[in-house]
Amino acid sequence: MKKLLVTGGAGFIGANFVHYWMQHYPSDKVVVIDALTYAGNIANLASVKDNQNFTFVHGDICDQNLIETLLTEHDIDTVVHFAAESHVDRSITGPDAFIETNILGTYALLKAAKIVWLDAPKAEGKEPKENHRFHHVSTDEVYGTLSATDPAFTEDTAYAPNSPYSASKAASDHLVRAYHHTYGLNVTTSNCSNNYGPYHFPEKLIPLVITNILHNKSLPIYGDGDKLEIGYM
Ligand SMILES: NC(=O)c1ccc[n+]([C@@H]2O[C@H](COP(=O)([O-])OP(=O)(O)OC[C@H]3O[C@@H](n4cnc5c(N)ncnc54)[C@H](O)[C@@H]3O)[C@@H](O)[C@H]2O)c1
């Protein structure tokens, strides 16, 4: 049985992940921490809220003490880290929140995981927590922008973030990597492309276009309409 701490579980992908996980691994325990920013919606978790293996905590990932408490009290072995400021356009008009949550929030999570999984057992003369894992959800936007004829990004593509959003995600990727190489934390990072589907926040491209069509409103075109000039999450 696994015990997961899911950050940002009231957001778009996090909520889909929680539903998937609880359906496929019903005996696992899932604790969600979410600050319920404009992008978080507790109603996204309505169908699991009464499950005895589910706990919701309204909190900020930057609160390292809270994270340490959750990791310890729930005996968490797996962190799945979705929480982020995720909208590129907002990062251009107000980058501060992106630096705070995406970089400092990830750093607080890493510090808490290191203390609870590695340092605390060692201080008691025990082995580090077995089978722990910190999974960091990042974005392909850390690799920059592709032109129509460029080959696809791979894991070996050099980082070239172009927006405050992707720069903050790139910084968090580097911190996650460093915590593995420096301290031995078991980490994985995924750099997915754009997702769409249920619970998608309506400011994002696909739900925005569909909602505008349904309300007979005009559709936003970016650049010359040939490609998206600003990456849309
Ligand atoms: N949506 C995409 O297409 C896409 C593509 C690639 C990568 N990603 C990455 O996947 C992850 C999830 O994306 P999403 O689209 O579901 O995002 P989202 O904006 O829908 O959800 C983010 C969630 O994080 C929460 N949150 C924000 N700041 C917080 C904080 N300080 N403490 C606790 N919770 C906080 C919000 O309340 C929200 O519930 C992000 O890390 C994003 O960078 C998303």
Image: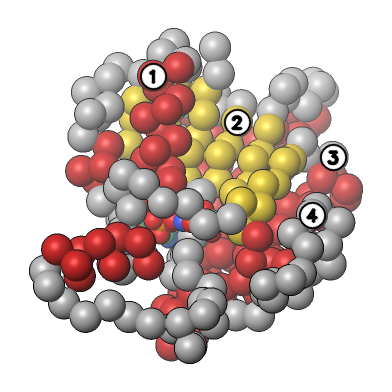
**Figure quarter occupied by ligand 1:** bottom left
The kind of residue tagged 3 is: Gly
| Foreground: disc 1 or disc 3 | 1
In the rendered structure, which disc, 4 or 2, sits on the residue that comes first in sequence?
2
Q: Are marks 3 and 2 in contact (CB under 8 Å)?
A: no
Image quarter in which the N terminus is found? top right
The kind of residue tagged 1 is: Gln
Which residue is disc 4 drawn over? 154
Tag 3 secondary structure = loop
Tag 2 secondary structure = strand
The kind of residue tagged 4 is: Thr
Which residue occupies 43% across, 46% down? 13
The Cα–Cα distance between marks 2 and 1, rounded to whole angstroms, is 17 Å
Which residue is disc 1 drawn over? 23
Which labelled disc corresponds to residue 78? 2
Q: Are marks 4 and 2 in contact (CB under 8 Å)?
A: no
With 181 as the anchor, is 78 left or right in this view?
Answer: left
Neighbourhood count class around disc 2 (C-alpha, 10 Å): few under 14, some 14–19, many 20 upward? many
Which residue occupies 52% across, 80% down? 226
Please state which of residues 60 and 219 is positioned toward the viewer in this rendering. 219
